[in-house]
Amino acid sequence: MTVLTLSACTGQHASEELSPNDDFNYVVDQFADLQILRYKVPGFESLTLKQKQLLYHLSEAALMGRDILYDQNCKYNLAIRRTLEAIYTNYKGNRDDAEFKALETYLKRVWFSNGIHHHYGEEKFRPGFSAEFFKKCVESIDASKLPLREGETVSQLVAELSPVICTPSVLGKRTVQSGDADVIKVSANNYYEGDLSTKEVNDFYTKLKGNDTITPPSYGLNSRLVKENGKIYEKVWKVGGLYSAAIEKIVAELEKAAAFAENDAQKKIIDTLIDYYRTGDLKTFDAYSILWVEDTRSEVDFVNGFIETYGDPLGRKASWESTVNFINKEATTRTKIVSDNAQWFEDHSPVDKRFKKETVKGVSAKVITVTMLGGDCYPATPIGINLPNADWIRRDHGSKSVTIENITEAYDKASLGNGFNEEFVWSDTERNAIKKYGFITDNLHTDLHECLGHASGKLLDGTDPDILGAYSSTLEEARADLFALYYLADPKLQELGLLADPDAYQAEYYKYMMNGLMTQLVRIEKGKNIEEAHMRNRQLIAKWVFENGQNEKVVELKKRDGKTFVVVNDYKKLRELFGKLLAEVQRIKSEGDYEAGKNLVENYGVQVDHALHAEILERYAKLNLAPYKGFVNPVMKEVKNAQGEVTDIVLDYTEGYTEQMLRYSKDYSFLPTYN
Ligand code: ZN
């Protein structure tokens, strides 16, 4: 509900403030549709030793849960990863063979997606090697290296995994969020076990929810729902429950971290999180979330747990993730201005008064520098986060919002002069605007989206927060994006000193429309429609304003030399349309108008114009770029003196992608192959 990811075109612009002569090696690897980058951690050296040690142990905890996400994404993921790694490290045949190369690429993609399905498109990626080749590879290596179940033979392993890898129809899609089929039955992920239907799941949780509508725990958040012999029950992810072996390791690192807490409030946060991991009690998770959101004093901060629910078609069960970070004080001056004025923005938004918050509580915003990414934040990572997700905690205690600037900076630096804007942007006017204002308006968009957008508005009394079901993620992202877009053009930003040029917003408007109408399609395979919530949201917004401004030609699609371009004719009217759609999306959320929400998403967010799509793919292919990016982490090391005491923590930026993945699989893998 609350993560901002990079759009296909963001990060493609150069920025004059950034030095192109930076000799840091940002680009690490490129394969399939993916590019692997490296991020810097500026300012780490000047932290205190105690802060560094805190970051170190939190960062270790961020890596301990890696296997959990693999298993959540699909029950065969750990078996496949371990089998492929065994082949990759032990294969004695010709490693230059085309099929072996394809197997290597496939394994790199499995690492990137934490499983066999595309991290963004949700579909299973297709191997460039045959089932016969897979069989040959498995049989060629020592059986003791393979993740065999007790009593399982090598041929049984091959028979089980081969169709999962090679047959497209088997477990074809990780999370299905629309269509006529039962979304629980057709999703390949591992949040539900046994032959459960959507109705059975909904009935189970409706009953559990009971009458607590004021401060309801997020039921279902930290468990797999299982149907066994007709009985439906939860397997809770906790110490002593499902995923215990990994969670115990997380807890052990959190305990070490607690000893280096900056203050008592932070120590209590860590202790409460440990308590939650031990008990699995969602009320304790809420208590932790409240302590966490109220701590705005600590410089070091982190997220570690079952947080985001994008992977569950019903938006209830959370994937495991972690980020570890410290504040970027200088850049936080900007977000502080935004958050200090949250009430003004809420009062002046174009939505109906009945849906506005009378008092915006505790929206805190900061710019952070990450030191470690884990679980569902790795290697693909958000550029902004706003938490916690529970509506009632946001209502009563506010939310914490971050913009991750060492990540956006890496995107920016890695994309200098890659030819993207030359190909897709209409003219030099737009290109120059993007060059001049792209970086700052992007970051401001993130600030406004996270800190104000998600935090704005309220539900009418009695509206069920879960009613929008499979459409909730897309609509929530649309709400936050529209809030940001609407205010980027507001003179208030000049008054607050956030943006000097009153026309600077046009750079972001142009990019948003170009991306939503055209260029984000580079991420979609030919013939497919849009699945991912953020992408659906972007097309929903762009198509809706395009259509609703068509009579006045606010935005046009123009052809030049057989190529399609987005042309924005009237930026002022475009802003009005963003405002109008914001009012409607807020109404849908506040009233819980499922039908209207469904129509918006299905009519504007999902269907792809296949002719335009084919054209965009062809133009993009010539640029030899990768539409998705992810990151390797720095290696964090303790420096010890002769007595064995830690005297410093240092970062190393030389590890490659494959090296890092193999090291993580060796040092941070604690779960059985099947869970
Ligand atoms: Zn968001």
Image: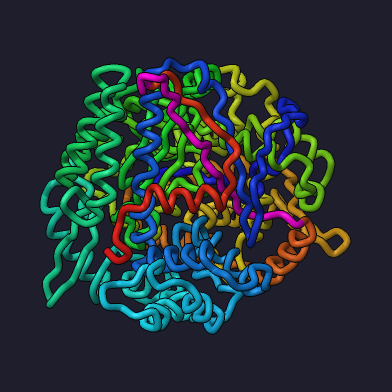
Asked which quadrant contains residue 73, the reply is bottom left
Q: Is residue 641 magenta?
A: yes
Q: Write the start and end of the magenta stretch as one range.
A: 624-645
Q: Is residue 593 visible?
A: yes
Q: How many marks?
A: 0
* Residue extending farthest right: 561
Could you say where residue 162 lies in the image, as x and y percent from the top left? 45, 79
Front one among 78 and 271: 78
Q: Vertically, is 372 above or below 494?
A: below
Could you say where residue 309 lies in the image, as x and y percent from the top left? 35, 52
Front one among 103 and 8: 103
Q: Vertically, is 129 above or below 591?
A: below
Q: Residue at coordinates 44% horizontally, 63% vertically from top-left? A: 81
Screen quadrant of the C terminus: bottom left
Could you say where residue 569 lies in the image, as x and y percent from the top left? 75, 45
Q: Residue at coordinates 61% horizontally, 32% vertically from top-left? A: 489
Could you say where residue 429 lies in the image, as x and y percent from the top left? 82, 38
Q: Is residue 214 visible?
A: no
Q: Residue at coordinates 32% horizontally, 74% vertically from top-left? A: 185
Q: Residue at coordinates 47% horizontally, 60% vertically from top-left? A: 601
Q: Vertically, is 193 above or below 470?
A: below
Q: Look at the image and name its color scheme.
A: rainbow
* Residue extending farthest front: 642
Q: Vertically, is 274 above or below 115?
A: above
